[in-house]
Image (cartoon, grey):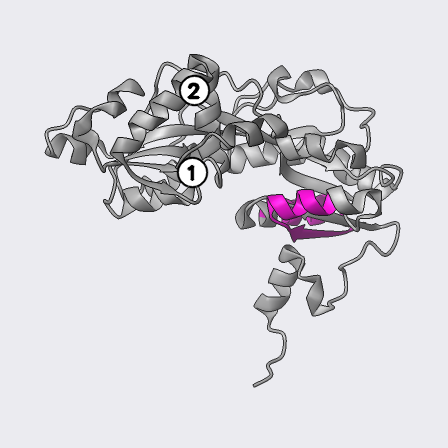
Amino acid sequence: MTQGITRRMFALAVLGGFCSLALPGCKSENENTVVIYSCGEGMANELLLSAMHRDLPEYDIRLHYVTTGTCAARLKTEGVSSEADIVLMLEGGYLRQIQPSLAVLDGYDFSAFESDLLDGSRTYLPFRRESACVAMNVAELEAKGLAVPSSYDDLLDSSYRGLVSMPNPKSSGTGYNFLRSLINSRGEEAALAYFDGLAENIYQFSSSGSGPVNALVQGEALIGLGMTYQAVSEINQGVPIEIGFFAEGSPWTMNGVAIVDGKQEKPAVRAVMDWMFSTGIMLDKQEFVPDKVFVDQHTEIPNFPQNMEYADMSGIFDIDEKQRLLKKWKY
């Protein structure tokens, strides 16, 4: 049975970039049109798009959701001929990978950003720092007579066998962040040996960061690694989850916003990028992820910890190094 396009299908097409539906707006057709490829989640995309339409009504701004891997592959293949004018919330390693396709940004005060989020190329503005944590169902641990772990080494105790969940670094960015942070703090050989030991207690190396979330919610695991603070704040309303602060600090990564080279001279594109610098980046911090991006930033969101210590994430954006390390990952 053939059905017409519903209002919901149309909205998904606009946000999701389903150009195969042949809807108008899948191409940057004039100087007032701006096409954004976003790797962000739906609610963040909706908030930003609504705010841009409110603040920049003279422009036709079209935001399409594209997965991180697909976005990077498209930009790497299509280069400056891409339909995208702006790339939003693309992870830092991929931003470096597609750097030849990105415009050098002039006129922005890069000293306003935290220095560890920059690489000196001036091809992107840091948009979001996403940190991860160790999340624990303390009440259930105590009910089982188990001590609440206070270090990574505590998690090696056999009493936690089958109670720890972690996303697989081969398929999850947050999983890789934990691997990278321990390699930086302990050295490669010692860190890999640590995960060999931890594997004995792992309930599941999940395919994505949602695995530990689901395991905690369903009571299948009581300790979750590789969970963002945002995920913890969302499930904390139904399951009493507490965050563990270990000495190594919170693993993190960064995603940014960039202009495809050749598009920077379009007034509409420049207006959107100026809006991102002045308004959009901070709006995301105030509503979704308050981790520090700007040096002078003071944002708070309920259930998010304040003034957390960040782990040493040196090398986190090196794609070649990531591939080398993941070849050594056994699980």
- Quarter holding residue 247: top left
**Count of residue discs:** 2
**What residue sits 53% from the left and 48% below the top?**
43
- As displayed, is residue 180 above or below residue 162? above
Q: Nearer the viewer, residue 199 or 287?
A: 199
Residue named by callout 1? 168
Q: CA distance from mark 2 to mark 1?
A: 15 Å
Residue 82 visible to the viewer: yes
Q: Nearer the viewer, residue 319 or 274?
A: 319
Question: What range is drawn magenta here?
Answer: 47-75
Which kind of residue does numbered mark 1 sit on?
Asn
Label 2 SS: helix
**What residue sits 55% from the left and 50% below the top?**
42
Residue found at the far bottom of this picture: 1
**Residue 176 x %, y %:** 48, 31
**What residue sits 16% from the left and 29% below the top?**
159
**Residue 292 x %, y %:** 54, 23
Report if residue 129 lies within the magenta region: no
Residue 308 visible to the viewer: no
**Residue 8 x %, y %:** 57, 67
Which class describes the residues within 10 Å of circle 2: few (<14), some (14-19), or many (20+)?
A: many
Whether label 2 touches label 1, CB < 8 Å: no
